[in-house]
Image (cartoon, rainbow, N blue to C red):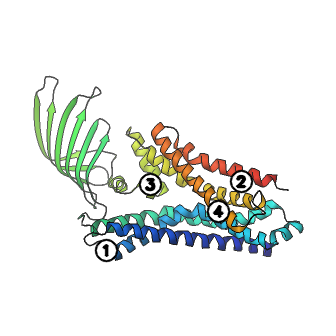
Amino acid sequence: MTVLSRYVSWNVFAAMMIVLLLLLGLDVVFSFIAELEDLDGNYRAVQALVYVLLTAPRRAYDLLPIAALVGGIAGLGMMANHSELTVMRAAGVSIRRIVWWVLKPALLLVVAGALLGQYVVPKTEKLAESRRAQALGQKLADGSFQSYWHREGDTIMRVARVESTGELRYLTFFRFDADGRLLSGARADEARHDGAGWQLSGLVETRLDRQGNTTVRSQPTERWDSQLTPEYLRLVTLNPEYLSLGNLYEYAGYLKRQGLDAEAYFLEFWKKALAPFATISMVLIACSFIFGPLRSVTMGLRILAGVLAGLLFRYGQDFLGYASLVYDFSPLLAAGLPIAVCLLLGGAAIARVK
């Protein structure tokens, strides 16, 4: 039985990897063609190709559930066409055991996806965007950006420039009371983080009382205690979907503590956290296609049905995600509902097979 389980798992795993490589190759080719429309300055075809290749880990991460679905259908479908599954069942092998053998290679994809999302994608996406920006003539160093607005407590601030080293240049502060009345305005030339807080340089503050009188004070240096850190500022330069699971949760928690909108970050956190279950749900759907209503159709029709099911899952999850941001319902529900539906449908279809 060990030899048989290895045979089934290897066939399904090989099919999943072939499908993943094919989908990734198509995605890379079409993305490269799209990038050719943005050629400008030093951003030529070679730089566009490097950019697309650097984003390949993120593209592979996004394609893993669909690759598991279509690969599972292809691998099991080939064995069904050769009557191997029929022989296995005639020999007393249960459907549940075959499904477990198919889930084994899917679990390898789950582990690979978790490693990609946590350690590889954030670094490659940051490098890709930085190199693209520099080639297009944007003279910002890696991790630096301009004109950043932020609110913390009763203070709204604007930073004209954030350096890649974490230093802040030309800051402006506006502090308000509970009624929204401006209490003070201040500007500083720069701010440096020393590990426990910020050290402001060249501070000039103007305070307003209730009668409209102003008081101006200047300080060469002053302490600014804030929960904002250079690490949080570096996260701003990346799209939430490209951040690691830990960074997403930490930064979303910080935004929530400050009373800011953190739903986009929580949505991406739950998508990444539930991604292993998404892959498993796709495998169950694949198994239900082979042992259920599509067991007697051609391989091409099975694969077409698998692609449509994968696209429906992806678009459904994206639609619910955007809807959760607009209508303010739980990001966990938006990310988890399509997965739960696929798990239930796949499990129920397999349970009905005799």
Which of the two marks, 1 or 3, is nearer to us in this view? 1
- Residue denoted by label 4: 304
Q: Is residue 72 left or right of residue 122?
A: right
* Foreground pick, 62 / 295: 295
Q: Please give left or right for residue 67 compared with residue 91 in the image.
A: left
Would you identify the image quadrant in which residue 286 lies? bottom right
SS assignment at label 1: loop
- Compare marks 2 and 1 and give the one earlier in the sequence: 1
| CB under 8 Å between discs 1 and 3 | no
- State the image coordinates of residue 125 (x, y, percent, origin top left): 41, 64
Give coordinates of residue 314: x percent, y percent: 56, 54
In the image, 101 versus 314, the foreground residue is 314
Q: Which residue is mark 2?
A: 346
Mark 4 and mark 1 in contact (Cβ < 8 Å)? no
Element at label 3: helix
Residue 164 appears left or right of 251? left
> Whole-percent x and y of residue 62?
52, 61
Query: Of callouts 1 and 3, which one flags the residue occurring earlier in the amino acid sequence?
Result: 1
- Residue under the point 38% across and 64% down: 126
Residue mark closest to the camera, 2 vs 1: 1
Badge 1: residue crowd in 10 Å (few <14, some 14–19, many ≥20): some
Between tags 2 and 3, which lies in front? 2
The kind of residue tagged 2 is: Gly
Of the residues under marks 1 and 4, which one precedes in the sequence? 1
Q: Which mark is residue 44?
A: 1
- Distance between the alpha carbons at the discs numbered 4 and 2: 17 Å
